[in-house]
């Protein structure tokens, strides 16, 4: 099994980490469009164009599956990617919705969706959750978290001030969808802010749950082959991967 993981930058490495932990694939090829990150502030047409270019990139590797780790792409360009790909294309939005539905017992649960402007404005999570009859959904664009994670600010006064800036007027949610693959890196701080009772939905874990539901994995791979590519400064991507993936 050979999988391609696509993200607008480095955030999708959090999805790769979950894939490695569950030993699903023999080879993982990661492509981060680091020259054009972030996607979260771009318009839908541009995001679609970049996403189709990513499909073309993966065609040279004869992969079995494409995982779209970028929430902005998953929200806006999944259909177009599927039209251009000969391999199945799975996005983090649909898997995140499924994981949330499985985690919550009550349709009256309070759900908070965090993401970039592009993801939140698409209302993709909100629409999907309402189709599953959840009623109390609040969405909030929290784009400042992305550069903080890029700068490896995972705790401390700066992050605490940003959490307060975004969350000071919010009621305590029953579940939070981390609708950007950067956000799991600050999940501990988010959890501490709201309390241990709040459930966090992590894109990587949600993807694994979705894959194991939709596909058969007769064999596990203890040590997957990893290959990293980017549109700019691949060495920087590889260095980040070593830190995040402990490789």
Image (cartoon, rainbow, N blue to C red):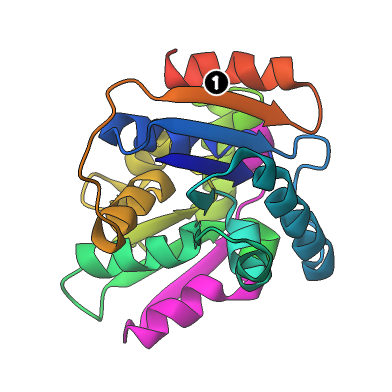
Q: Quadrant of residue 31?
A: top right
Residues 237 and 181: in front is 237
Q: Secondary structure at mark 1?
A: helix
Q: In the rendered image, which quarter contains the C terminus?
A: top left
Q: Is residue 40 visible?
A: no
Q: Residue drawn 68% across and 37% down?
A: 32
Q: Is residue 55 left or right of residue 240?
A: right
**Residue span colored magenta:** 120-148
Q: Is residue 135 magenta-colored?
A: yes
Residue farthest to the left, as pictured: 105
Residue 160, given in percent of the width and then of the height, sits at 52, 34
Residue 99, given in percent of the width and then of the height, sits at 30, 61
Q: Residue drawn 41% across and 58% down?
A: 177
Residue annotated with mark 1: 241
Residue neighbourhood size for the residue with mark 1, other residues' Cα within 10 Å, grouped as few (<14), some (14–19), many (≥20)? some
Residues 36 and 64: in front is 64
| Figure label count | 1
Q: Quadrant of residue 50?
A: bottom right
Q: In the rendered image, which quarter contains the N terminus?
A: top left
Q: Is residue 122 magenta-colored?
A: yes
Q: Is residue 121 above or below residue 189?
A: below
Residue 156, given in percent of the width and then of the height, sits at 51, 23
Q: Residue drawn 65% across and 71% down?
A: 83
Q: Residue drawn 82% across and 69% down?
A: 45
Q: Is residue 80 left or right of residue 129?
A: right
Q: Is residue 67 visible?
A: yes
Residue 133, given in percent of the width and then of the height, sits at 31, 87
């Amino acid at each position: 099994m050979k999988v391609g993981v696509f993200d607008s930058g480095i955030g999708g490495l959090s999805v790769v980490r979950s894939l490695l932990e569950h030993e699903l694939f023999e080879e993982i090829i990661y492509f981060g469009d680091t020259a054009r990150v972030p996607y979260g502030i771009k318009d839908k047409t541009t995001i679609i164009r970049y996403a189709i270019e990513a499909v073309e990139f993966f065609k040279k590797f004869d992969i079995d599956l494409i995982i779209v780790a970028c929430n902005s792409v998953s929200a806006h360009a999944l259909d177009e990617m599927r039209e251009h790909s000969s391999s199945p294309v799975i996005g983090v939005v649909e898997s995140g919705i499924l994981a949330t539905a499985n985690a919550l017992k009550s349709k009256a649960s309070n759900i908070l969706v965090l993401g970039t402007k592009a993801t939140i404005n698409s209302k993709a999570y909100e629409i999907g959750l309402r189709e599953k009859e959840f009623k109390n959904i609040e969405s909030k664009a929290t784009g400042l978290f992305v550069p903080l994670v890029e700068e490896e600010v995972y705790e401390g006064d700066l992050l605490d001030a940003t959490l307060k800036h975004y969350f000071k007027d919010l009621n305590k949610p029953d579940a939070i969808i981390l609708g950007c693959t950067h956000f799991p890196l600050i999940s501990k701080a988010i959890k501490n802010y709201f309390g241990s009772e709040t459930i966090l939905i992590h894109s990587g874990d949600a993807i694994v749950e979705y894959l194991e539901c939709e596909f058969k994995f007769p064999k596990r791979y203890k040590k997957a082959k990893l290959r990293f590519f980017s549109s700019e400064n691949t060495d920087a991507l590889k260095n980040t991967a070593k830190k995040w993936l402990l490789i």
